């Protein structure tokens, strides 16, 4: 098929996402609870220096995962991409487990954090009511198809990016004593200290840092609904580096200068006072009257945006699973607006589990869900890197040239091996500190997802008696998007010059 059609004849999904949608979403689309709320828990776990180290480690992994996924999804733009890649390039049981793992964890945490933010203003309405209200809002937003989702996320992303930029500027001015009346500098790196729990603290912080940066695969999942993946996806992947450095690294650095790791407002499993985000606290310390409420409102928007993106990718993932025969065939149905409506309804029904947050004291369930989400993200990244490793090996075995690819990932096979090893090691050591003394909440969050993932894979593998797909017969042709010479020349022309690239992001 070519890139000019408005609808993919095979999938039924409409190709209505423009390059500007994917470019902006790749930077700010999934900035949400991980950075704005869970980073407080990470600061308590690791301290300012430990937090910075954890985010740098995860950022390094995320960049290479994005590059590897970008190569495959620009060549084979499929909705629900990496779950399909896993079935084709590894084996069917692995693809099934990866798909269900990704869908379940995103579905569960879609609206779980919203009540925690709303407690900043009021506790009159129960948490389950807030979750239900915003779940309906996100469901409604997803009824408008990829174009509606892309437009909403485009503007949400701009708001979130502007918020982070203002946060970094205000934070630096506050730290230097220009505003707020107090000079902070690195005082909290000295007392109470740069590390809250040494190396163990850094290890504990890695999973929530992974949750914060999860979502690099959103651009790939939406590839099947992109007008021109050849142009849009490589551009979006390049933006991931900007997102890692300018949004995550700078944010946690500023946070660590102004908020001590032992601040009672930081999110921990033992207390209910979780309604104050580290972002809000920085504006409070800056002494900007009313700014904390504005920031909290922006944080609420980011959570709706993150949940909206989560609902979008999970419904597409579930539809892809149904199309592959792993879920009920009805879930693959696409309505005339290009929405997998039954998959969307099913995802929303599972998201109702977030109502449980109002019945469990403290924030224990939320932290368990965050840990499960982080582990699910690491397992997803492992599967993407493993897929890409085998994809390249198959290209060599079948005598194909890399010149056929619209975008070529650097670092193969070495960075694949590094990324895969890092993901598994982090999963295994993430709950190390929860063994002595025994912490059931921590152990469940750290290892339940890992055990279920590999346990399910082993059962399916033995049951189906499937072997890994040999490189020589691996399907490298289905779903490849072919382009006309005119389209390729047009893309090359548009990519010349800094200002053309900059304008393309917004137009």
Image: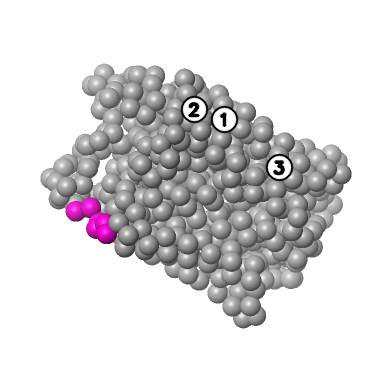
Tell me if residue 265 comes above or below residue 475 in the rendering.
below
Tell me if residue 102 comes above or below residue 46 in the rendering.
above
- Classify the position of the N terminus by image quarter: top left
Q: Which residue corresponds to mark 3?
A: 131
Q: Regarding mark 1 in the picture, which secondary structure is present there?
A: helix
Q: Is residue 94 visible?
A: yes
Asked if residue 468 is among those painted magenta in the image, a careful observer would answer yes
Residue that appears at 46% across and 40% down: 318
Nearest the eye: 112 or 72 = 112
Q: Regarding mark 2 in the picture, which secondary structure is present there?
A: loop
Residue that appears at 56% across and 58% down: 372
Q: Main secondary structure of the magenta part?
A: loop
Report, in whole angstroms, how far the alpha carbon at label 1 lies from the one at label 2. Answer: 8 Å
- Whether residues under marks 2 and 3 lie with C-beta atoms below 8 angstroms apart, the answer is no
Q: Whole-percent x and y of residue 288?
A: 82, 42
- Whether residues under marks 1 and 2 lie with C-beta atoms below 8 angstroms apart, the answer is yes
Residue that appears at 42% across and 26% down: 13
Tell me if residue 407 comes above or below residue 471 in the rendering.
above
Number of marks present in the image shown? 3
Q: Is residue 19 visible?
A: no
Displayed quadrant of residue 268: bottom right
Q: Which residue corresponds to mark 2?
A: 339
Report, in whole angstroms, how far the alpha carbon at label 1 lies from the one at label 3. Answer: 16 Å
Magenta stretch: give its range: 465-470
Q: Along the horizontal axis of the image, is 254 left or right of 145?
A: right
Q: Which residue corresponds to mark 1?
A: 142
Q: Whole-percent x and y of residue 325?
A: 36, 42
Q: Earlier in the sequence, mark 2 or mark 3?
A: 3
């Amino acid at each position: 098929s070519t890139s000019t059609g408005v609808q993919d004849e095979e999938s039924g999904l409409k190709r209505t996402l423009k390059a500007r949608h994917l470019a902006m979403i790749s930077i700010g689309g999934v900035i949400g609870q991980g950075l704005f709320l869970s980073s407080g828990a990470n600061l308590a776990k690791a301290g300012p220096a430990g937090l910075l180290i954890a985010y740098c480690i995860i950022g390094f992994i995320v960049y290479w995962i994005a590059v590897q996924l970008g190569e495959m999804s620009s060549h084979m733009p499929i909705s629900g991409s990496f779950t399909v890649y896993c079935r084709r390039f590894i084996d069917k049981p692995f693809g099934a487990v990866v798909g269900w793992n990704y869908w379940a964890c995103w579905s569960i945490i879609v609206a779980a954090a919203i009540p925690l933010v709303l407690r900043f203003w009021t506790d009159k309405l129960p948490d389950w009511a807030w979750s239900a209200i915003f779940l309906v809002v996100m469901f409604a937003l997803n009824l408008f198809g990829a174009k509606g989702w892309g437009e909403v996320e485009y503007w949400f992303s701009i708001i979130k990016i502007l918020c982070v930029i203002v946060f970094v500027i205000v934070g630096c001015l506050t730290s230097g004593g220009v505003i707020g009346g107090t000079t902070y500098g690195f005082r909290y790196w000295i007392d109470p200290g740069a590390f809250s729990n040494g190396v163990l603290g850094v290890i504990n912080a890695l999973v929530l840092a992974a949750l914060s940066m999860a979502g690099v695969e959103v651009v790939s999942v939406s590839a099947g609904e992109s007008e021109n993946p050849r142009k849009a996806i490589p551009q979006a992947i390049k933006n991931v580096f900007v997102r890692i450095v300018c949004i995550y690294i700078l944010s946690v650095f500023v946070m660590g200068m102004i908020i001590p790791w032992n601040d009672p407002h930081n999110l921990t499993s033992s207390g209910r006072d979780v309604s104050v985000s580290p972002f809000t606290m920085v504006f409070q310390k800056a002494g900007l009257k009313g700014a904390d409420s504005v920031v909290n409102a922006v944080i609420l928007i980011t959570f709706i945006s993150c949940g909206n993106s989560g609902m979008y990718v999970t419904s597409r993932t579930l539809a892809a699973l149904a199309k592959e025969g792993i879920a009920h065939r009805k879930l693959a149905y696409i309505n005339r607006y290009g929405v997998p409506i039954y998959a969307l309804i099913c995802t929303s029904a599972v998201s109702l589990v977030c109502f449980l947050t109002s019945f469990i004291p403290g924030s224990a369930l939320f932290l368990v869900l965050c840990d499960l989400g982080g582990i699910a993200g690491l397992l997803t990244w492992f599967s993407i890197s493993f897929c890409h490793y085998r994809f390249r090996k198959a290209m060599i075995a079948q005598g194909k040239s890399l010149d056929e690819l619209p975008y070529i990932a650097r670092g193969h096979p070495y960075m694949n091996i590094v990324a895969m090893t890092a993901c598994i090691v982090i999963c295994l050591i993430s709950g190390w500190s929860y063994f002595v003394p025994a912490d059931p909440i921590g152990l469940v969050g750290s290892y339940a997802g890992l055990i279920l993932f590999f346990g399910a894979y082993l059962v399916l593998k033995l049951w189906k008696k499937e072997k890994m797909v040999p490189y020589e017969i691996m399907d490298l042709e289905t779903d490849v998007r072919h382009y006309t010479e005119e389209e390729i020349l047009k893309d090359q022309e548009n990519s010349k010059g800094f200002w053309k690239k900059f304008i393309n992001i917004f137009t």
